[in-house]
Amino acid sequence: MKSKIHKWQIISAREIVSKDLFSLVEKRCYHPVKKIDHRFYSINSSDWINVIPVTADGKIIMLRQHRLGTDEITIETPGGVIETDESPATAAMRELKEETGYEAETIQLLSMLSSNPSIMNNHIYFYLASGCRKTCFQNLDQSEDIEVEIFSQEEILKMIKDGIISHSIVVTAFLLYFFNERDESRKGPFGVRSERFK
């Protein structure tokens, strides 16, 4: 069925604030059906990656760190910003190694999703990193303080159910992971491919 939704027309856009990780943009828009003007605000950011790292024996590598947005200690999967001229897969492997000291035998794209289309322009690439093994020490940024912990799949599911893992991006990553695990005979529910790293 054809949608009756009409897109807003962007008349003008101006950057209000620009920081290292994002910029805030004001957009003056016009609706062709309602015949009204309205100002919207969006956050422009680089794309992100998020990684589910799994060891050879099926355990999952997680991070414990302090998040200032909610002022809470959280349990999360590795993730970060894709740097300029860096592929999402390369960024996923880099962040995994820097934050955990682990490297993966193979990496598989699970999905690419919009981070928050109502106010943000960027996307998140979700990866499964398989056959992870410890190869080095963490290489953290000056502002990072991260503890690495290993959990079973059952422990992960319980922490999600109990609200201990409460980061929406991390919960989404595990939803994609368990979708992928449900049918091992296929490449994954989205027909994605794996890449081998040596």
Image (cartoon, rainbow, N blue to C red):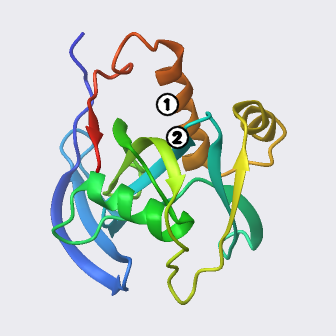
User: Viewer-proximal residue, 53 or 14?
Assistant: 53
User: Viewer-proximal residue, 99 or 21?
Assistant: 99
Name the kind of residue labelled 1 in the image: Leu
**x then y, percent, for residue 4:** 25, 23
**x then y, percent, for residue 122:** 32, 57
In 3D space, how far apart are the residues under numbered discs 2 and 1 (Cα atoms)? Answer: 5 Å
Name the kind of residue labelled 2 in the image: Ala
**x then y, percent, for residue 6:** 22, 35
Q: Name the quadrant containing residue 10.
A: bottom left
User: Viewer-proximal residue, 33 or 166?
Assistant: 166
Asked if residue 30 is positioned above or below residue 21 in the image, the reply reads above
Give the residue drawn at x 77%, y 67%.
73
Dot 1 corresponds to which residue?
Answer: 176
Q: Name the quadrant containing residue 91.
A: bottom left
Determine whether, in the image, residue 195 is placed left or right of residue 55. Answer: left
Dot 2 corresponds to which residue?
Answer: 173
> The N terminus appears in which quarter of the rendering?
top left
Label 1 SS: helix
**x then y, percent, for residue 64:** 71, 64
Label 2 SS: helix
Asked if residue 69 is positioned above or below residue 106 in the image, the reply reads below
